[in-house]
Amino acid sequence: MPIQRLTVSAALLVALFATAPAHAVEAPVATPVLAPLPMPLANLAPAVAQSTLPTDAAALRPAPTETADGSQGDEAADLRQALVSLAMKLRDVRYVRGGRSPSTGFDCSGFVRYVFAHAVGLRLPANSAAQFLAGIKVKRADMQPGDLVFFHTRGRKRISHVGIYLDNGRFIHSPSAGKSVEVSSLDDAYWAKRFAGARRPEGIAQNG
């Protein structure tokens, strides 16, 4: 009868599950417990980066840029050297009143003006008195190559002569009629008595 068949089928199903192999049932997987990090996560990347640096990492850094120390790479020193170099090349050019070039000769202010214009591109006033006013006052102990030195050669009321300072008390100038561009000393009795002071042209002062 139908009721007996249903009972038998149910019994077969129970027997089938009872005899199924144990590995057929999926066992739950335990979640592993993670140990805490030894340091905050934010600090992990720097630590890794540090551990991977080569032992000679300092050699891989770019070399520092060389800085000016007053003797190398100094723009003002380069300008002064250019002035002195050109001035010395003009020795023996004869004195001519109002002269402004090597081909015609120089007077004192013409010589100074020519050197500054052609050595460093700086245009100075046309006469020594105006050049004196255009510069920045410099103490004698602080004079440097390329500074201008001024003199009273026609009375002490006005500037009437100018030269370019070299070093060790020496200066180069175009002195007077019958002479040529030459190097003289501030310690010479004639020039020492008439020395009016030193000035540094603003174009040189701005670079050092």
Image (cartoon, rainbow, N blue to C red):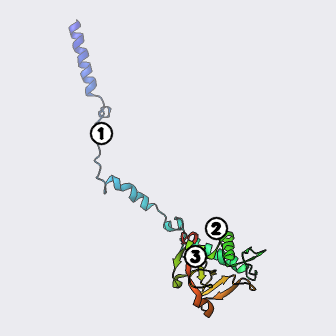
Q: Label 2 sits on what residue type?
A: Arg
Mark found first going from the N terminus, 1 or 2: 1
Q: How crowded is the residue under tag 2: few (<14 C-alpha within 10 Å), some, or many (20+)?
A: some
Marks 3 and 2 sit apart, C-alpha to C-alpha, by 14 Å
- Image coordinates of residue 126 in percent, x first then y, are 65, 71
Mark found first going from the N terminus, 3 or 2: 2
Mark found first going from the N terminus, 1 or 3: 1
Q: Which of 89 and 71 is in front in this view?
A: 89
User: Which residue is rendered at x = 62% and y = 82% of the image?
Assistant: 166
Q: Label 1 sits on what residue type?
A: Val
191 on left or right of 13: right
**Residue matched to label 2:** 123
Which label sits in the foreground, 1 or 2? Answer: 2
**Residue matched to label 1:** 29
129 on left or right of 17: right
Tell me if residue 62 comes above or below residue 99 in the rendering.
above
Which label sits in the foreground, 3 or 2? Answer: 3
Marks 1 and 2 sit apart, C-alpha to C-alpha, by 92 Å
User: Which residue is rendered at x = 29% and y = 42% of the image?
Assistant: 31
Task: Return the mark for residue 132.
Answer: 3
- Image coordinates of residue 100 in percent, x first then y, are 72, 73
Tell me if residue 112 comes above or below residue 39 in the rendering.
below
For residue 25, which quarter of the picture?
top left
Q: Which of 51 and 153 is in front in this view?
A: 153
